[in-house]
Image (cartoon, rainbow, N blue to C red):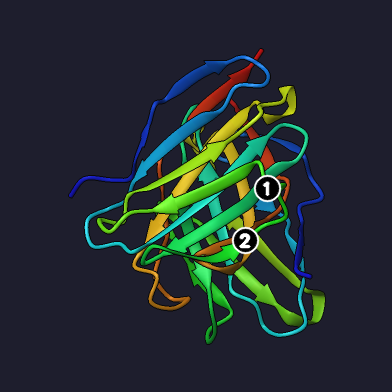
Amino acid sequence: KAGVTQTPRYLIKTRGQQVTLSCSPISGHRSVSWYQQTPGQGLQFLFEYFSETQRNKGNFPGRFSGRQFSNSRSEMNVSTLELGDSALYLCASSLGDGGGTEAFFGQGTRLTVV
Amino acid sequence: AQSVTQPDIHITVSEGASLELRCNYSYGATPYLFWYVQSPGQGLQLLLKYFSGDTLVQGIKGFEAEFKRSQSSFNLRKPSVHWSDAAEYFCGSGGYQKVTFGTGTKLQVIP
C-alpha cells in the first residue's frame, strides 16, 4: 500500500510569491494534517482537514491556507512568501475517526524562500 | 494549552549502551502521548504511543516508554543502542490529527 506522497520534494521561491504544496494521503485515510518544521521553532501544527473541512487550526497567519478535495488529497498554500517561511512542510494522514488511529507522515516538501 | 518539553537537545551514546530520552508534558487530563523518530531527510515515523492502560508501552525497533503521571513524564528507553538509531526523536502529545511536539533530541551513536 502506497504511503503518504508529498509533491514537490524541493521548491525554491522568491519573497512575495505564493506557493502550493500537495499531499496525497494513504488510500482510505480521510484526515490530513500539516506541520511546519524549522530549526528555530521545531515542529508546529498548521491545520487539519477531514472530509474536505478544516477541523483543527494552529496559530499561523492567514497567509497559510489549505483545502482538501473529495478524494482526500490536500493542498496548502502560502501567499506573499517571507524568508521565515523557509521550512520543511510535512503532512500526515490518518483515518481520522477518533484519536486512536495512527498518523503516517510523508517525507515533506523542503521550501526555500530567497 | 498543551506543551511538551524535551530537556536534552543532543545526546551522545556508545553503541551497545542503554539510552533514555526525557519528555515532560503539561496537560490537565491524561493526554495521548507519542514518540516519533526522524532520520535525516525523512518524515516522522511513530515509535510508540500511550493512550491509557499499562503505563509501560512497547514500540518498534526495541524501544519502550513509561508513562509516569506523578512526574508528568513519558521517557523513551532502549537497553542497547545500535548505530542505526542515530536520528532525531520527538515526543508529542494530543490526538493523532493534531500533535504538539517537543523540540526534539538528536541522538548521536559512537562506535
Which chain letter goes with mark 1?
A
Instruction: Locate residue A28 relative to residue B15 in the image: left or right.
Output: left
- Name the quarter where the C terminus of chain A is drawn: top right
Q: Which mark is residue B101?
A: none
Q: How many badges with numbers are in the image?
A: 2
x 61%, y 51%: residue = A46
Residue B73 appears in view: yes
x 44%, y 52%: residue = A67
**Three-letter amino acid code at the position of disc 1:** Gly
The percent position of residue A80, horizontal first and vertical second, equals 66, 29
Q: Residues within 10 Å of mark 1 (few under 14, many from 20)?
A: few
Which chain letter goes with mark 2?
A
Distance CA(mark 1)–CA(mark 2):
11 Å
Q: Nearer the viewer, mark 1 or mark 2?
A: 1
The percent position of residue A70, horizontal first and vertical second, equals 28, 59
Instruction: Locate residue B83 relative to residue B31 in the image: left or right.
Output: left
Relative height, residue B89 to residue A55 (above, below):
above
Q: Residues within 10 Å of mark 2 (few under 14, many from 20)?
A: some
Q: Which residue is mark 1?
A: A62
Q: Which mark is residue A57?
A: 2
Task: Label 1: state its secondary structure.
Answer: loop
Instruction: Locate residue A98 relative to residue B4 in the image: left or right.
Output: left
Relative height, residue A28 to residue A91 (above, below):
below
Q: Are marks 1 and 2 on the same chain?
A: yes
Question: Which numbered disc flags the more N-terminal residue, 1 or 2?
Answer: 2
Task: Label 2: state its secondary structure.
Answer: strand
Which residue occupies the foreground of this view, A18 or A98?
A: A18
x 79%, y 45%: residue = B8
The percent position of residue A57, horizontal first and vertical second, equals 62, 61
x 22%, y 56%: residue = A27
**Three-letter amino acid code at the position of disc 2:** Lys
The percent position of residue A110, horizontal first and vertical second, equals 52, 26
